[in-house]
Image: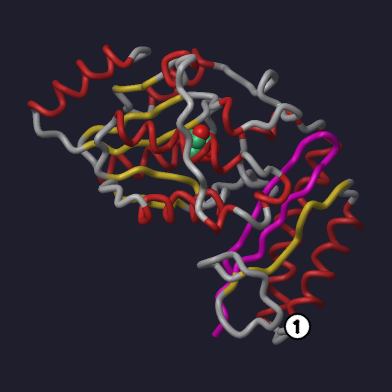
Amino acid sequence: MAKTFQQLTQILDELRVAERSIGLVPTMGALHAGHLSLVERSRVVADTTIVSIFVNPTQFAPTEDLAKYPRPLERDLEQLQKAGVSVAFVPEVAEIYPDDCTTSIVAPRVAQQLEGEYRPSHFGGVCTVVLKLLHLIPAEVAFFGEKDFQQLAVIRQMAKDLNLVTRIEGCPIIRESDGLAMSSRNVYLSTAEREIAASLNQTLSFVEGQINQGETDGHILMAEMRQRLIDAGVSDIDYAVLAQPSNLEIVDEVTEDCVALIACHVGQTRLLDNRVIQVD
Ligand code: PAF
């Protein structure tokens, strides 16, 4: 495990000498099967997989769960070892953000709607840390989950805008047996809340079914999504929308492939889910 830049540099030097290609899986730890699927993909694509574990403070607003975000480091490292990952990069906050660090990234336009409306500083923090990681680690490919659909769109756009050489690859959502999308925040849910949380995936299946049966009115579909979530007991819906996958603009009339996106609270826990819906 590398904790400091110095330790990381030493490992990278050895990899360079051995001419091994690097796959980077950036994470905030509390690893689950979703993260391990990114690792698995990286191990297919690259010679060496580096997993970073860093709970990035700049992507949390002061009101959010930075202090209580789960940090089961030993368990994470064990899981990585079992998954065949030989390099974990686990820096301290002071190493990534020294006191005199005042430069940050302005996230691309696709960051502004949806999550951007509810978490205005979030994607700036994500972009800043991802760019720092990509500067530190000369990865050929970096892997991100499609569960955070907008994050993936933002990172892809940043990589394009800033001419990054690392290829950005998205990996499919991994779900629990009840359909709940895997997330490190699922540990916050009580048993009763877990049942309600399953309604996110059910709502996505419902809207996909409606579209497959020929409903094209985006506003009817979005109202139905919202109603389903309310009926299931979801307390607070930030958005339940249909959007264009490329720019996340809201879809009024479904005429081509679109993405259904949900962000809502179940109890105190904010959950996200999405599904790309193919239109014939
Ligand atoms: O998706 C996450 O876990 C984080 O947003 C990321 C990409 C590791 C940046 O901190």
Q: 95 or 139: nearer the eye? A: 95
Q: Report the side of 22 relative to 218 (left or right).
A: left
Q: Is residue 270 magenta?
A: yes
Which three-letter amino acid code belongs to the residue tagged 1? Asp
Q: 17 or 122: nearer the eye? A: 122
Report if residue 33 is visible in the image: no
Q: Give the magenta-colored segment's residue range.
A: 259-280
Q: Which residue is mark 1?
A: 217
Q: Report the side of 150 relative to 262 (left or right).
A: left
Name the residue located 38 percent from the left edge and 32 percent from the top edge: 132
Q: Report the side of 74 relative to 168 (left or right).
A: right
Name the residue located 66 percent from the left edge and 65 percent from the top edge: 260
Report if residue 96 is visible in the image: yes
Q: Position of residue 105 (x, y in %)?
A: 47, 40
Mark 1 secondary-structure assignment: loop
Name the residue located 74 percent from the left edge and 59 percent from the top edge: 202
Q: Position of residue 178 (x, y in %)?
A: 70, 48
10 Å crowding of disc 1: few (<14), some (14-19), many (20+):
some
Question: Which secondary structure type mostly characterizes the magenta part of the structure?
Answer: strand
Name the residue located 82 percent from the left edge and 52 percent from the top edge: 237
Q: Position of residue 171 (x, y in %)?
A: 44, 51
Q: Is residue 43 above or below residue 236?
A: above
Q: Is residue 6 above or below residue 103?
A: above
Q: 85 or 67: nearer the eye? A: 67
Q: 277 or 63: nearer the eye? A: 63
The C terminus, quarter of image: bottom right
Q: Is residue 57 magenta?
A: no
- Can you tell me whether the CB of the residue at mark 1 lies under 8 Å from the nearest atom of ligand 1? no
Q: How many marks?
A: 1
